[in-house]
Amino acid sequence: MESKHFCLYPIYMDSARSLSEGRKYRKEICVQRPRYHEIKNALEKLEIEYTDEPSKKHPRDFFNSGRFRIKKEYGRLFVIEGISQTIAELRSKPGSSEETSREKQSRGKAVHGVVQNGVYVENKLNLVRKKKAKKKK
């Protein structure tokens, strides 16, 4: 029995991710780091019927929650292209910039950090790993 819906996680449309990291569509039709509420606003603006599940999480993107179940009758690529265009329009409007406080703080500053186990860890205290002493022969 075939389902009448397809699932859409924000990671599927993230142009900053590679295919192996969870992106599902071409980079040309994706948006950089789409958020759950941006996709929800775009679906409402496009008047596409959907079921949102804000507590669901993708296994490769566990820290960002949210999933949408969209009817297949609209067509996957049509929906993805429409959402990405709508998000780009919403982001380009002046005054509607929804930057997080971390993005505002890091703007103009060089952020130093390390990627550990696929997660970016910010080095706020500028701590440096202690060098190992070389053994004498």
Image (tube, helix red, strand yellow):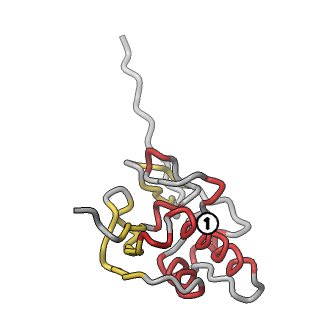
Q: Is 35 in front, or is 82?
A: 82
Q: Nearer the viewer, residue 131 or 39?
A: 39
Residue 63 drawn above or below residue 25: below
Q: Quadrant of the N terminus?
A: bottom left
Residue at position x 47%, y 54% from top? 24
Q: Dividing the image into 4 quarters, which one contains the C terminus?
A: top left
Q: Is residue 116 above or below residue 9?
A: above
**Front residue (pair 121, 117):** 117
| Residue 129 location (% of width, % of height) | 45, 45
Q: Residues within 10 Å of mark 1 (few under 14, many from 20)?
A: some
**Residue farthest along the right direction in this orientation:** 94
Disc 1 marks a residue whose amino acid type is Glu
The residue most toward the top is 137
The image quarter containing residue 111 is bottom right
Task: Report which residue position mark 1 lands on.
Answer: 81
Rendered residue at 27%/62% (across/down): 2
Between residues 21 and 12, which one lies in front from this camera angle? 12
Q: Could you tell me which residue is drawn at 55 percent across and 79 percent down?
A: 38
- The reply, left or right, for residue 66 in relation to residue 39 is left
Seen in the picture, residue 130 relative to 43 is either above or below; the reply is above
Task: Tell me what residue is drawn at x 59 percent, y 83 percent.
Answer: 46
Residue 22 image offset from top left, x and y in percent: 43, 53
Q: Secondary structure at mark 1?
A: helix
Q: Quadrant of residue 9?
A: bottom left
* Image x and y of residue 133, in percent: 40, 29
Q: Quadrant of residue 71?
A: bottom left
